[in-house]
Image (cartoon, helix red, strand yellow):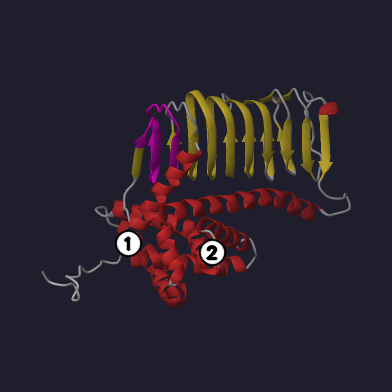
Amino acid sequence: MKKLISAALCVITMALLAGTAAGINMDSAGNKFDIAGSVMADQAVEGDYIAFGNTVKLEAGVKGDIIAAGRSIIITDENAVQNIFAAGQNITVRAKSVRNIYAAGGDITVGSGTTAGGVYLVGAMVNFGGVATDVTVAAPAVTVDGTIYGNLVIRSDHITFGKNVTVDGHVTIYGTVKPELPPNIDESKVTFRRVIHSGKDVEQAVSKGISRAKVISAVVCVVTAVLIALVLTLLRGGYFKARAAEFDKRAWKMLLWGLLAFIVVPVVALACLLTIFVMPVGLIVLMLYAVILYLAPVVAGTVLGRRLLPKTNGYLAAALGAGAVSLLLLVPYLKILLFLAAAFYTLGLAVICLRPRREHGPDKHEPRH
């Protein structure tokens, strides 16, 4: 699984650095990898399925793991799935049988008809209506209306229990206000842990409750940045070493090119969307533009790590640089300036890589035969 994830990240990186303007579809050893603006899958997959796109809809019979990231993710599978890993703004899972479900995003729904071993959800709004052995959720608003044979752990200040909810194990709730329990939940099996003292006001309570979810999200972001930095170093270690060596001389040039691309590329792409014949080009450009901006802090952190720690192992320097930049992005106000600087620099690198190169004739100093 780790090798498959690394391979997927490598494919994304190669597509960006090479300026590929098309969706990617790859099959290898029974595994499948898709990246496109809209990913639609309706064919059986013997191994793992990895999908990245604005909209990801998977209806295939996947026998391995499902890894999906995008704005809108819908996973429906009538067969057995090993594990589901999903990250996006809107996530809906309706799978007949899943070993474990891990999801992080905005609005997350695990619908009825879903049977899972463990369910672990972190989001803004979480709705669980399936059947699971153990469930752990963290969100400002949580709705539970399913069957849980084991334990239920909830971190939220706004909890709603449906009329069909049943919990055979123990219920642990972290929040500022104890929720109203339905009659079919034994109160003797419920442990409520108040996250702040009762003398604090509700606004402070909600703020602290949400910050716990933000801590989890921050840890995931830092770990993800470090992993991507390691993959980038594995794939193009020499490239980043060269960029670090010339950073002092060419950083301002990259920033200027990046600023120009930051303004011009969205305008050109939107103009393409207004023309039927080049609309696909506009969509692809916008998708690549968004992915480059997403990877910008990691790319900039990798270069800075190699520049500031030239005598350190390349992998360690890249990981430290990417992790440090990801942590600094958590600082209010500073994160805006830092992200813009990273975005300009990374876009500048992309512009330089995509510039047409002149073909040089033979070296003047080369001896003639």
Q: Describe residue 151's horizontal placement relative to residue 89 as left or right.
A: right
Q: Amino acid at mark 2?
A: Gly
Choose between 14 and 193: the one closer to the eye: 14
Q: Give the quadrant of the C terminus.
A: bottom left
Residue 141: image location, x then y, percent: 68, 43
Instruction: Answer with mark 2 or mark 1, whichever residue precedes in sequence.
Output: 1
Residue placed under numbered mark 1 in the picture: 271
Q: Position of residue 362 (x, y in %)?
A: 17, 70
**Could you tell me which residue is drawn at 75 percent across and 22 percent down?**
168
Residue 74 image offset from top left, x and y in percent:
49, 36
Mark whose residue sits in front, 2 or 1? 2
What residue is shown with label 2?
Answer: 305
Of 4 and 71, the residue lying toward us: 4
**In the foreground, 165 or 232:** 232
Label 1 sits on a secondary structure element that is: helix
Q: Residues within 10 Å of mark 1 (few under 14, many from 20)?
A: few
Give the residue drawn at x 55%, y 57%: 316
Q: Tell me: 297 left or right of 7.
A: right
Where does the magenta region start and end?
A: 27-56
Viewer can see residue 146: no
Query: Where does residue 15 sit, x and y in percent of width and height?
Result: 36, 52
Identity, as a three-letter code, of the amino acid under mark 1: Ala
Is 263 placed above or below 162 here? below
Question: Is residue 187 in sight in this rendering?
Answer: yes
Residue drawn where x is 74% and y is 54% of the image = 207
